[in-house]
Image: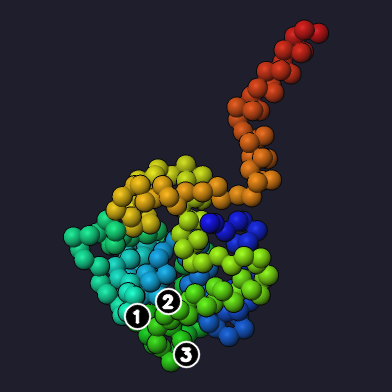
Amino acid sequence: MVFYPDEIEALLTELMRGYETNCNSACIGIMSNFDWGLRIGELCALKWSDINWKNETIFIQRMEDSSGNIVEYVKSDSEAGYRELVLTDSVINMLKLIKNSSQVLSEYIFCNEVGARKTKLQFLNKLRRAERAIGFEKEKGSHCIRRTVASRMNVSGIALDEIRRWLGHTDLETTLKYIYNPFREDITKKIKNNSILTANSKCIQIYSKSQAV
């Protein structure tokens, strides 16, 4: 349901290798989406004009629909569509990498060598090829990236309503279905063993023994 940390690291390495090999901007798009958690239709519809470089944010306001057309969100449904997301330094650097290395002018951020935007299918195929190159036992789809982002945000202590807004959900119940354990079982056990309450309990035991002596 989610991408584990080691899988993300391997994917980022493979995708960057792919970009350095043939400048496929879909590689950068997928990498950036591990920060954004966008719907794949939203990802392929991003334009340079959506970026506020001064505020370091990006405005999500359109998507590719099931017919392959770009559609603007209905403003009355802003909770599920229109939203402004903060850009991290790593994503800003990747976006600048695309902008500075592009040989064509295109309104879309992720496009091919002639300026045509990347489609949902092209993003999905790129993700699938990267997973196969790494040797994933079971391929994970683009929606797993959204679940990963939501789960990471939850573990970081970000309020559920903020996660809902970030993902573009209308109902909190929908967001709750995106929350999973973002770590493998062995890591989860280590986290449990290193929790404050567990550590505090051990400290009390040590203190009690020292007092008895």
Q: How many marks?
A: 3
Residue 151 percent location from the top left of the image: 49, 50
- Residue receiving disc 3: 113
Residue 103 is tagged as none
Q: Is residue 144 left or right of residue 53?
A: right
Badge 1 or badge 3: first in the primary sequence: 1
Crowding at dot 3, Cα within 10 Å, few <14 / some 14-19 / many 20+, comes out as some
Q: Is residue 103 above or below residue 12?
A: below
The residue furthest front is 138
Residue under the point 62% across and 83% down: 21
* Amino acid type indicated by mark 3: Glu
* Amino acid type indicated by mark 2: Lys
- Residue receiving disc 2: 120
Quarter of the image for residue 37 reads: bottom left
* Amino acid type indicated by mark 1: Gly
- Residue receiving disc 1: 68
Residue 74 percent location from the top left of the image: 21, 66
SS assignment at label 1 = loop
Crowding at dot 1, Cα within 10 Å, few <14 / some 14-19 / many 20+, comes out as few
Q: Is residue 170 above or below residue 52?
A: above
Q: CA distance from mark 2 to mark 3?
A: 17 Å
Q: Is residue 211 left or right of residue 119?
A: right
The answer to whether the residue labelled 1 contacts the one labelled 2, judged by CB atoms less than 8 Å apart, is: yes
Badge 2 or badge 3: first in the primary sequence: 3
